[in-house]
Image: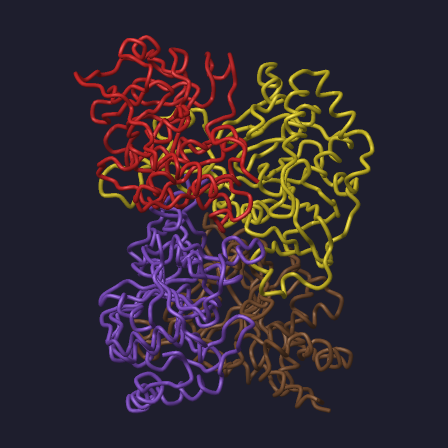
Chain colours: A brown, B purple, C yellow, D red
């Protein structure tokens, strides 16, 4: 049976969550529009990683009782270890743009807005950037608007930096000290050249670039079984599309 | 000290043209029936505040020409995609937008709730948002040993908070459950107008089980009953969002004509379904 | 991510000597059973924080020699009058006291809850309290047109919050009802230890009626059952304060001998009444 | 039937609440230790004054749902119009001391502490000072410790100042511009001389000083009837003492 693209991305992100890192992930928060990251956190947990997942926009049984500000208060305190951010543009320094393109930003196409990015990028120690579209239009040399910077100068309060960027073509890891991405793995079907061609910013390319490790059979069984059961309420359309119609 | 029980139209009449109005987001007891009544009454020049983001109700008001300016952290219809009338207004340059970021909206309202002129907030330094916000100030944290720039966000006091509650009692106490951002909005605003699914007997403040989810009548100016008053949005565990309706809106409202047809069918026409 | 269900003594063992411990006031789910267990375990050198004031539980701990310092806005037994062991310790000079004022305690905890280094607070200028508090700073409000001095209170992060809840579930969620200062304490502290009247089945966070009064397990390190765990203080509408007992304590504890006799009878001896 | 001292004080405070003042009282907050002020607010309401009373330490049906901070948040916003303060010492400038006497303050006798006074005195526009004991020990030329100042220099944020001081002997009104009390009325049995002798600070004495107006028969009926019914839960001992045993 073929592995769905979504399953591959879920497994790739789950690998990043478990990867050695100075800041372990015990609590991850995920928004309504992020089914793949949410499934990745659950998969990491299934694999034995002791991580708590807070689904931000759960209508019933929402994890918060102090209102919408509780997420940001938790992040402000450093009680959220991992958050996911995307962007209409992401540049080679891991700056992200959620406002839109053009000058002024948003004039050519206006996107929803910054959401909490201008805060979460500073207060959450581990951020994984995730954007399925991997094209020169999205991965640009310099964003038109900085919703959240990838790195900050010394003296600016900041608990961490993006750990990696996961796209529909590959995984880049991010070196905050050099403010530069490196190609870490290629999804099946991609080559160094295809990725280079689709990427608008420059990045490092080590000698060995493995293929992105897909989900194991046990992973896939968990995704289609208990993880689906836990997340179907929050992501019904995604679950139906990726894991098929549910046996009634 | 009695809180009047209004009709929906009487409640809408309490919203003055030009008012600075705070609205909850789509997933948090947003008073859509009241928003429709506001459009019918032809309110103009509103300054809307998205707490902390904006959605369907704001897009309706923008499309109907009721909004002059908007302060928010994002405008989105969620799974239904971009908010079409917001997008069109931005393209046309007809909307004065002040971008924010979610925790800055909460912080500004908490400052108002406490009656302090400002509150600090981490982050934002080095973004392109900060230079856009000349109302925010960066100071050096006076408690730090080394230089430590930190943003101060001034208090934001809405003229009005508009919220939808799961229930209200005859004293004007209203129950919003765990969505405590509604309490923050009500506390921060000069006045709060509430629609409620239903009126219950007794006093919600005297029920120790329900009281934790109550906004006290102290903050409430008037209440109107609006059954399914969040529709097509959802309300806690009482009813879910009408995703098909919102999808249809998102498609229709891509054009001016489509939006006008939607308005005629679902806002301006009498609606047997809701108590409007 | 599971929250252990401890015995009362095991819970008390989690409180280290020298810890900075926040305690609710007498009228707000104060964990008196746990305080008695702490005295039995012989905890020493606590720095207590009264949120925002202190009462019976603090007086017991002071009398039993468990407290080195105390930050609070007042210490009182309410209708039973002055707190006798506090008064005696002040006379003996054996207690390091940092005076505060109620809203400054709340503000310091809210700053901790939000993870900001400080928050502003009105008032206090011209009092004799302000010069006593070298940890507070007065700045000129940067948003005012004219000179406007305002106090900044730094965040206060207790090592531990100790609270008593009306109920807890097996996930570690605890219900405190409308006493939301308990949530603030739990959010602000590094860790929270909870006694609960009883354990309920199911998940309190998933009950939309109860969730508004819940502190999430996210903040809770361990739970122990303590039936009538606030006694002789009251608990919401579940039971009232035992005024006769507190009066008797207030009289007995006026002398060292009287306090020792009280301790022997009601704290150190096995108590059939409570689940200790 | 004789009017109890408590009834007289209640009526005197109710008169102050209704007295012409630039800041009307629509919302008064009263603490657990203040049965007389609470009854006075209820009496003012009985007399037709549209005032809301928040009883701070009500165990069941407490007026707040945002925790103990809600009172102070309300006051910070200016949503509490009237509050009552007392003190172990009150001086001629309306400074109050809640900490204790001696040098350092509290060394000769330590009282509970400042409570919220250092904040409420600034944020609540109308404060009525209330202390039954009227002696040179309490009403001093200068307090040993300022828990809350009676007046503040220009430029210090402050919404108002004490309106009056009610004691067991008389009512003083307070002139904030001059930071000075004036004798406003004498309780039955007191004279200008007896008050002067019992007062440690200097104050103005107008030519005409009326007797404190006691409660009317309607007032007394309301106090013993509906007001008692409303407050008995909060102040059981006070109600029993002043209004007698309750007919079961």
Left or right of residue A25: residue B181: left
Does C60 appear above or below A99?
above
Q: Which one is in front, D40 or B23?
A: D40
Left or right of residue B69: residue A143: right
Q: Position of residue A158 (x, y in %)?
A: 50, 53
Q: Position of residue B259 (x, y in %)?
A: 32, 87
Does C75 appear above or below B25?
above
Left or right of residue D206: residue C156: right
- Any part of residue A121 in sight: no
Q: Residue at x 49, y 83 (%)?
A: B243
Q: Residue at x 60, y 59 (%)?
A: A81
Farthest residue in the left direction?
D207
Q: Which one is in front, C187 or C54?
A: C54
Q: Which one is in front, B168 or B79?
A: B168
Quarter of the figure with residue C61: top right
Q: Position of residue C10 (x, y in %)?
A: 79, 42
Q: Quadrant of the C terminus of chain C?
A: top right
Q: Residue at x 24, y 27 (%)?
A: D176
- Any part of residue B217 in sight: yes
Q: Which one is in front, B100 or B36?
A: B36
Does D193 appear above or below B27?
above
How many numbered discs sit on the rendered protein? 0
Left or right of residue C158: residue D36: left
Q: Quadrant of the N terminus of chain C?
A: bottom right
Farthest residue in the front direction?
D1
Quarter of the figure with residue B105: bottom left
Q: Position of residue C18 (x, y in %)?
A: 67, 31
């Amino acid at each position: 049976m073929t592995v769905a693209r979504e399953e591959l991305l879920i497994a790739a992100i789950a690998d990043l969550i478990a990867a050695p890192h100075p800041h372990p992930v015990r609590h991850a928060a995920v928004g309504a529009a992020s089914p793949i990251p949410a499934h990745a956190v659950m998969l990491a947990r299934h694999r034995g990683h002791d991580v708590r997942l807070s689904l931000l926009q759960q209508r019933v049984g929402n994890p918060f009782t102090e209102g919408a500000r509780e997420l940001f208060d938790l992040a402000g305190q450093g009680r959220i270890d991992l958050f996911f951010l995307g962007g209409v543009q992401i540049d080679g320094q891991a700056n992200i743009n959620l406002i839109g393109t053009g000058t002024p930003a948003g004039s050519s196409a206006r996107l929803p807005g910054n959401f909490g990015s201008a805060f979460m990028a500073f207060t959450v120690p581990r951020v994984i950037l995730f954007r399925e579209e991997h094209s020169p239009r999205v991965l640009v040399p310099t964003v038109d608007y900085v919703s959240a910077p990838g790195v900050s100068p010394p003296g600016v309060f900041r608990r961490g930096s993006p750990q990696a960027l996961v796209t529909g073509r590959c995984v880049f890891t991010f070196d905050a000290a050099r403010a530069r991405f490196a190609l870490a793995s290629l999804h099946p079907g991609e080559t160094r050249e295809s990725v280079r061609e689709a990427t608008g910013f420059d990045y490092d390319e080590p000698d060995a670039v493995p293929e992105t490790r897909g989900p194991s059979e046990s992973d896939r069984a968990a995704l289609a079984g208990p993880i689906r059961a836990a997340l179907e309420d929050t992501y019904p359309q995604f679950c139906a599309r990726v894991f098929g119609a549910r046996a009634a | 000290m009695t809180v009047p029980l209004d009709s929906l139209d009487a409640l809408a009449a309490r919203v003055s043209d030009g008012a600075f109005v705070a609205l909850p987001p789509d997933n948090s007891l947003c008073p859509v029936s009241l928003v429709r009544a506001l459009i019918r009454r032809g309110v103009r020049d509103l300054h809307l505040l998205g707490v902390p983001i904006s959605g369907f109700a704001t897009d309706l008001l923008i499309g109907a020409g009721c909004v002059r300016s908007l302060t928010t952290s994002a405008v989105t219809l969620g799974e239904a995609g971009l908010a079409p009338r917001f997008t069109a207004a931005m393209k046309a340059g007809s909307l004065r937008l002040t971008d924010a970021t979610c925790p800055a909206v909460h912080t500004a309202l908490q400052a108002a709730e406490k009656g302090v002129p400002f509150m600090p907030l981490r982050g934002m330094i080095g973004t392109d948002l900060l230079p856009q916000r000349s109302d925010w100030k960066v100071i050096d944290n006076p408690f730090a040993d080394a230089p430590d720039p930190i943003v101060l966000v001034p208090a934001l006091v809405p003229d009005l908070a508009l919220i939808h509650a799961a229930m209200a009692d005859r004293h004007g106490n209203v129950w919003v459950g765990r969505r405590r951002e509604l309490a923050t909005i009500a506390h921060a605003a000069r006045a709060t107008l509430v629609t409620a699914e239903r009126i219950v007997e007794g006093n919600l403040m005297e029920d120790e089980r329900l009281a934790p989810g109550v906004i006290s009548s102290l903050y409430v100016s008037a209440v109107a009953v609006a059954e399914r008053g969040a529709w097509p949005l959802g309300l806690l565990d009482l009813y879910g969002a009408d995703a098909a309706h919102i999808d249809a809106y998102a498609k229709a409202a891509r054009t001016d004509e489509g939006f006008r047809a939607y308005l005629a069918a679902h806002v301006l026409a009498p609606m047997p379904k809701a108590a409007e």
